[in-house]
Amino acid sequence: MKRFNPETKTFKVFNALYNGAALTAAQARKMGVKNISAEVSRIRHSGYAVYANQRTAGNGVTVTEYVMGKPSREIVALGYAAKAAGLTLDELKG
């Protein structure tokens, strides 16, 4: 798994998620992160399972919360199948 530079926004988001926090865009802005979806995308591309769960806040606004979780068996099986077929991340990013 890729390590993140501790001075980056990606590391701030990763560290919070890895430690069990559920982050919203508003919480990320307080950490200095303007685009949480971009940071989550970077974390996902590094091999971590980050899920986006939508909920309705008390004022009726739909909010997306990001949480780190365990990948489903299907995702793990797809990874093994891709590896067995000879696919690599470098080829996919190509």
Image: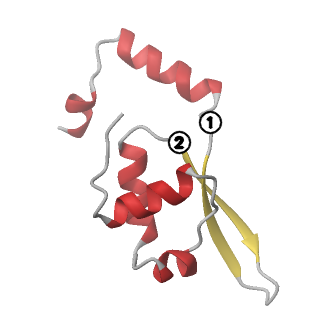
Residue at figure coordinates x 63%, y 53% from the top left: 20
The percent coordinates of residue 38 (x first, y second) are 38, 64
Seen in the picture, residue 81 relative to 43 is either above or below; the reply is above
**Which of the pair 64/29 is nearer the observer?**
29
**Residue lying farthest bottom?**
59
**Residue at position x 47%, y 41% in the image:** 48
Which residue is farthest right? 58
In terms of sequence position, does the residue under pointer 2 or pointer 1 come before the other?
A: 2
Task: Give x and y (percent) for residue 88.
Answer: 27, 23
Numbered disc 2: secondary structure: loop
- The type of residue carrying mark 1 is Lys
The residue indicated by pointer 2 is: 49
Circles 2 and 1, Cβ within 8 Å, touching? The answer is: yes
Q: Residues within 10 Å of mark 2 (few under 14, many from 20)?
A: some
Helix, strand or loop for disc 1:
loop
- The three-letter amino acid code for the residue at tag 2 is Ala
On residue 70, which mark appears?
1
Locate the N terminus and report the quarter of the image it occupies.
Answer: top left
